[in-house]
Amino acid sequence: MAETETATREAGFGRDALAQRHQWLVDQELARREQDRMIYGGKLLALLRPRELARVGTQLSTELGLHYAEPDPGDWIEEV
């Protein structure tokens, strides 16, 4: 571990990780670059949240051996 936050940042770790995240967002068409800035889509979180919930739901379903199905808006959800 780096002794200070500055040492970690200067080593490029933060910059590299951020650059990879920016590129992923551009590849997914969730953001675009304009000169030296990143412009994020207005519905970025609304698009990413369901993707992450579905990914985690599927992962837990596999790990626990339980069925996972995404509910539709207004569906009644109850414990089984």
Image (cartoon, rainbow, N blue to C red):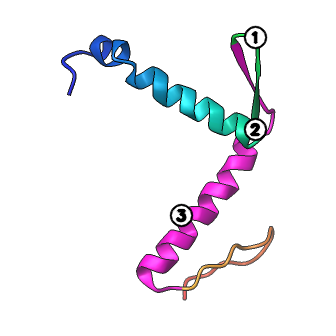
Q: Which residue is mark 3?
A: 56
Q: Does the residue at mark 1 contact the one at mark 3 (Cβ under 8 Å)?
A: no
Q: How many marks?
A: 3
- Relative to 56, does residue 5 appear above or below in the rendering? above
Q: Separation of disc 1 and disc 3 at Cα?
A: 35 Å
The image shows residue 75, relative to residue 67, as above or below, that is: above
Which residue type carries mark 1?
Answer: Gln
Graded by Cα atoms within 10 Å as few (under 14), some (14 to 19) or many (20 or more), the crowding at tag 1 reads few
Residue type, label 2: Leu
Which dot, 1 or 2, sits closer to the camera? 1
Dot 1 or dot 3, earlier in sequence: 1
Q: Position of residue 34 (x, y in %)?
A: 78, 16
Residue shown at 42%/77% (left/top)? 63
Q: Closer to the camera: disc 1 or disc 3?
A: 1
**Residue pictured at 42% horizontal, 81% vertical:** 64
Say which mark, if any, is on residue 35. Answer: 1
Q: Please say whether residue 32 is one of the residues in the magenta stretch.
A: no
Which residue in the structure is indicated by mark 2? 30
Tell me the kind of residue under disc 3.
Val
Q: CA distance from mark 1 to mark 2?
A: 17 Å
- Judge by depth and name the residue closer to the eye, 24 or 53: 24
**Secondary structure of the residue carrying numbered label 1:** loop
In this rendering, would 53 be left or right of 73? left
